[in-house]
Every structure is written in C-alpha cells, then in structure tokens.
Amino acid sequence: MNFLGNYQKYSRLRDIGKRGLVLDIETRASNKISKTIAPFAQSIRHSMMVSTDEFLKNRLSQEKSEEADFGKRLIAREILDAERESEVQYDSENGIVKTKKYWLGNIDWIQHLLSRIDQQSNWEKILKQTVFLTFNYDRVLEYCIFLYLTSDKQYADAAAHSFIKEMQIYHINGFIGPLEKIPFGAVENGKYQEIAKGMETVWEKRLNPEDAEKVKYREFLKKARRVYFLGFSYIPDNLNSIGIDRGAGIIRNAKVYATAMGLSSQNRLRVSSFLDLKDFEKRNEPEPMPEIEVQRAPMMTDTMYLLKYEREERMAKDQAKRNQMRYENRILKDASAVDLILDYYTIP
C-alpha cells in the first residue's frame, strides 16, 4: 500500500521546533519522538519515492533509524485508522449513512474468492492449502476471512482465530499483528512501538543473507501448480525477496496469471519480460516457428535428407506448441481478469 500521500499532511508541521510545540501523533508521544517529526516531515514532503517502503529504505542507517521507526509507527497508525473507518457506516449521533473512503462493503477480489470457495465442499481444505504471500502490512485478508468464518460459517471468534492461524498467510514485510492481539481498527491501543518492531522492509531483510523465510518462500513457489499475482507492483526487489529472479524459472512449471490493471503498456512489457509471460493483448498471436537448419552430410541421399528435415520440423513444431502452452500464462490488464483467475482457481 502507498500511504506516502497521506503522510504528506504532516509536512505542515515542519516548523514545529521553532514554535516550541509538542505534537501528540501517538498517544502522549515522548519528546524524543516529537523531535523526529520536523526532519521526517521535511524529508517526506520532498521525497521522490513512489512508495512508503522505498522512502524508508533510505532511512535504515543507524543515524536515521529514529526516522525509519517513526515512519513505521505512522504506517501502523494510518492502517489502524483506515481499519476503523472501514467499519463505521453511520453517524452515531444522527443515525445517517456516511460516505467512507474505506469500506469493506465494497466487493473486491477477497469477497469473490470466498464466495467461490464457499461453493466447494472442501472449502476448509482449499483455504488451508492455499499459500498467500503479501507485501501489505494490513490484515484485510485475515479480517475478511474472520468475517466469513464467524458470519457465514457461524464459527465462534476463538475458533475463527484458530482457523486463521492454521492458514498459510505470510506477510513478507511483517504486519500490524494478529487480530486477537490487536483488534481490527484498534487505533487507541497505543502499541505502535511494539507494532513497528514487527514491520521489516525487504531492504532490512537483505542485511541477513541467510534469510530462512526466503528459502521457505522459494520452496512454496517450486512446488506450486498455480501462481497468481493480484494487485502486485512487480518491483524487482520484492520479486527477488521471495526467490523470483529474472525469467521466473522457479515458477516455469506452474500455471501463472498476473493482473496489471492501471499499468502502462511499457510497464506490462517490462513485467511480462521479467516473468516470461505473454501480454494479454498478444495472447492470440501465433507462436513463430524457429528457423529449421539441416546440414547435409556427405553420402546423404535426398530421401535421407527429407527424413531428417521432417524430423527437425516436427521437433520445431513441438517446441512452438510447448511455448504456446507456456504463454497461456499471461498478464491481464482488465479488472474482470480477477474473475477469470478465481474461476480457474476454484472450479474443479
């Protein structure tokens, strides 16, 4: 998620030191944190980075560690605030419907996914066997599953939390924390220092070359029969952090679909090249036949030459067919592509 734009509202506090004010960003924030606000606000206001993680990447040094920690706390605060907002649909005083920037009532891929899985008799097995790798710090996926279990399957809260723990949901960069420990939208709990410790960017993980988590992710990908990229940014550092290098050889034997809504044609080309996928717009283009070259050996008759040529031609056609099958894996730029992915995923 990109909360950079939201943080820029703090840039107006850049002269706080001159005014001698104390800003309560977190609950009763310490003076030490307040001193961090001015340089942080100035930096983020002028930053050229497109995501929060990339902004924090340049503040991981010992000298800038306080700014990085402060940034993570702001991320936590923004996410928890958005979580709380997503559930409030009514003005408690006037009882009228309120227009919300965030609302879980909007249908999205998670709701579509759970609706389709619910049609299967082995829905529990499907949920527990699916591996979710997410770079988001939020718990929207877990919370939607929690609502599905408690509202649609009549699970008790404790049983739903236990079920989610058994699922394979991995937050690559860490996350706010489990729902039973930090309730959804619990802005007032004030545990931002503790939360920030569990938020680790991919660049921080690079400091540990023997990352056991990356090994685990690679094993998931090696064994996967189907791999789907949903709402993904395709930043090479993020792909590398889970073991996907240029050419994506690790998922060569899997069925792969990748959404690219909102990406430019040049970006789709870059992504399709990196992952060795075919752009959705070019999916029906015939696979070019490789040039066939047959060396004519001494004493080779015309019949022998023809037989060798036909054999080489069959091999070339088989290769083209294999390429065409592989390029059924493709970049999908339209939002409706999510339906295609989920249908393929859930319908036997």
Image (cartoon, rainbow, N blue to C red):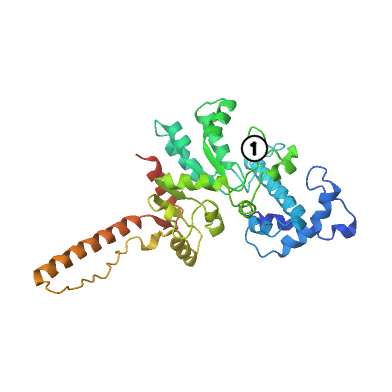
Horizontal side of residue 64 vs 162, given as left or right? right
- Percent across and percent down for residue 299 are 11, 73
Secondary structure of residue under mark 1? loop
Question: Which residue is identified by label 1?
Answer: 184
- Name the residue rendered at 61%, 48% in the picture: 173
Horizontal side of residue 122 vs 292, given as left or right? right
Report the front residue among 299 and 5.
299
- Name the residue rendered at 53%, 55% in the picture: 240
- Percent across and percent down for residue 345 are 40, 43
- Percent across and percent down for residue 137 are 62, 46
**Residue type at tag 1:** Phe
Residue farthest to the front? 298
51 over 211 or under it: above or below: below
Report the front residue among 5 and 190.
190
Evaluate whether residue 5 shows in this view: no
Report the front residue among 335 and 140.
140
- Name the residue rendered at 50%, 61% in the picture: 263
